[in-house]
Amino acid sequence: MKFSYTWLRELVPGLKMDVTTLAQQITMKTAECEGVHDPGAFAGASVAAVASAENSEPDSIIEIDNKSLTNRPDLWGHLGMAREVAAIAGLSVADPVGDLPAAASKGDLSIALQLEDHFFVGADNGLFGLISDKAHQNLIALNSITTISTTFPERDIFAPAAVKLASGISLSDLGKPLQVFKKMIDRQVKATKKQITGSVVRVDGFGNLITNIPREAFDILSKEKVYTVQFGGEKFRRIHSDYHQVDEGECVILFNSLNMLEIGIYKGNASDLLGLAYDSVVTITFDE
């Protein structure tokens, strides 16, 4: 099983242990590590690709013997391994959904709905609205008949509801009916001959801003044209190829390995320093 060192550091803020030492600690205290590898060693490895795309520093992959984890299903994912690493290092695990839009708050209802003949359970944070434009067939509030207080709704509310639905229990039997649920607007890129307008769709743990503007649209519209990238009150006339083309603390704009426009601050937090967040508008204007 392979784990991204970059993702583990993102989930465990303050982790200073280098990757080799961390692998040794995991071997001694948790499970046998088979080695530390460069992401390029795994052709097409999605973990490596995504991790290297979203961060300014190169990633490493910690490979752990599968047999060592057979009896530890809690470690079959990055969040579970991050909890183990945090315990080894004496640190805390970050909220893995901390960069979701503000709609995903602790006050959101727990809901279940039927949409296009499929069932969904989760927090009423607006994400279900991105699944389909069609009207829902049924909608209920979970935890509304026999109320329980929990800080872990995924385990105590969502999972039991999913099991009941899978066993054939009617959705209507799981909670009181609701009329509406939150719907997040699906932000689409708008492109004309003079301008591309997009928005920030994710802020990663390093404060880098990932937009929905694809390289393909930029390459087509920017041929033989001068362009200006604008967000907030900032304007730039250059798109870089990597983070090291700017000095520490300066803004860098590039297309990441997923070919989406990304905005960062070299060795800094772009979201904090630029005052941008999820849904912030980013435009590229082309001069005639």
Image (cartoon, helix red, strand yellow):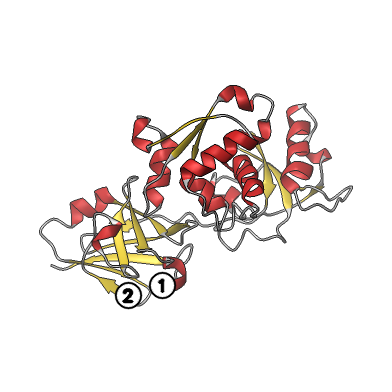
Q: Quadrant of residue 100?
A: bottom right
Residue 275 visible to the viewer: no
- Percent coordinates x, y for residue 108 in the rendering: 70, 58
**Are discs 2 and 1 less than 8 Å apart at CB?**
yes
Element assignment for label 1 = helix
Compared to 45, does 186 lie above or below? Answer: below
Q: Quadrant of residue 273?
A: bottom left
Residue type, mark 2 in image: Glu
- Percent coordinates x, y for residue 171 in the rendering: 77, 38
Marks 2 and 1 sit apart, C-alpha to C-alpha, by 8 Å
- Percent coordinates x, y for residue 234 in the rendering: 32, 75
Compared to 133, does 29 lie above or below? Answer: above
Going from the N terminus, do you reach mark 2 or mark 1 first? 2
Residue type, mark 1 in image: Leu
The front one of 258 and 268 is: 268
Can you tell which of label 2 and label 1 is closer to the viewer? 1
Q: Residue drawn at (56%, 51%), measured in percent from left and top? A: 11
Q: Describe residue 21's horizontal placement relative to residue 179 as left or right.
A: left
- Determine which residue is flagged by label 2: 234
Q: Categorize mark 1 by other alpha carbons within 10 Å: few (<14), some (14-19), many (20+).
A: some
Q: Residue drawn at (24%, 61%), measured in percent from left and top? A: 245
Q: Residue drawn at (76%, 32%), measured in percent from left and top? A: 163
Q: Residue drawn at (57%, 24%), measured in percent from left and top? A: 66
Q: Categorize mark 2 by other alpha carbons within 10 Å: few (<14), some (14-19), many (20+).
A: few
- Percent coordinates x, y for residue 226 in the rendering: 15, 66
Q: Tell me the quarter of the image containing the C terminus.
A: bottom left
Residue 227 visible to the viewer: yes
Element assignment for label 2 = strand
- Determine which residue is flagged by label 1: 274
Q: Residue furthest right?
A: 146
Q: Residue furthest left?
A: 224
